[in-house]
Image: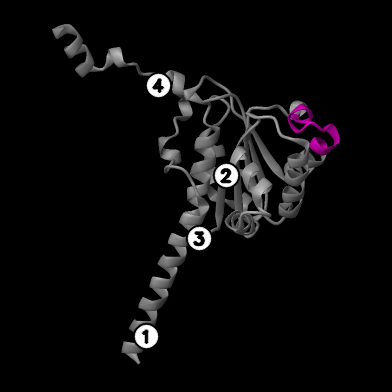
Amino acid sequence: MEFLRIILEQELNMREQKSRKNKVAKAHLPILKTFDEFDLSLQPSLNQWQVDELKKLEWLEDKYNIVLLGGAGVGKTHIAIALGHLALSRNHKVFFTTLEELIVLLKTKDIVKANATRLGYLQQCALVIIDEVGYLPIEKEISNSLFQLLNKLYRKTSVIITTSVEFGHWGDLLKDEMLANAILDRVTHRAQVIHLKGESYRLLDHKNIFTRKDFCRVFRQK
């Protein structure tokens, strides 16, 4: 009986590891980002208490959404990815996509079986992250498909949206004011909107080739 118990425990551990690897692969999250790497001193609109509340993932259990709103480089995607990896570590199903990639999935789901499968998996996830909303205008037909998708996820799945577009301009983005209002109604009904401000992290961390020691050494030699 002891031998059987050990065998069964090993089998369960192997299955759990396989399940986790499968979830990580299907999540399509970009490179690992964590809150330990996030410099709060450069983000005046977010404090440590708020970060700690986000990390608890109670909002995920309660099917709340998060909208990360702000200009380029203020940390929207970093926070979204960090929350995605945290949810994965707690055995939740996660799906990450940019809006541009999601549009491709919606356009081709009827002709590309793999894309239909990915959309099917998306609807099974506890957390869906839609990154970079607002960089490209959206065709009205796709806006309708996006509404239908978000309507299916409404109150069943938590959605994180990163966007640089204020809510008042979503009508222009989606080419339809009524549709924009309907989408925002579902996204923001049970949601925390986090308006990130401050300077771009990338600009603050700007580096150029003339400050590299090896380049300067070679340049002086010439």
Closer to the camera in the image, 86 or 57? 86
Determine if the magenta segment contains residue 174: yes
The amino acid marked with disc number 1 is: Arg
Please provide percent x and percent y for residue 175: 79, 31
The amino acid marked with disc number 3 is: Asn
In the picture of the structure, the residue carrying the numbered disc 3 is 91
Q: Is 34 above or below relative to 168?
A: below
Q: Residues within 10 Å of mark 3 (few under 14, many from 20)?
A: some
In primary-sequence order, the first of circles 3 and 1 is 1
Classify mark 2: helix, strand or loop: strand
Q: How far is disc 4 from disc 1 in space, using C-alphas?
A: 54 Å
Q: Is 156 above or below relative to 7?
A: above
Q: How far is disc 2 from disc 1 in space, using C-alphas?
A: 41 Å
In primary-sequence order, the first of circles 3 and 4 is 3
Which region is colored magenta? 170-181
Residue 205 numbered mark, or none = 4
In the picture of the structure, the residue carrying the numbered disc 2 is 97
Q: How far is disc 2 from disc 4 in space, using C-alphas?
A: 26 Å
What color scheme is it?
one colour
Image quarter hosting the N terminus = bottom left
Q: How far is disc 3 from disc 1 in space, using C-alphas?
A: 24 Å
Single out the residue that lies furthest toward the bottom.
1
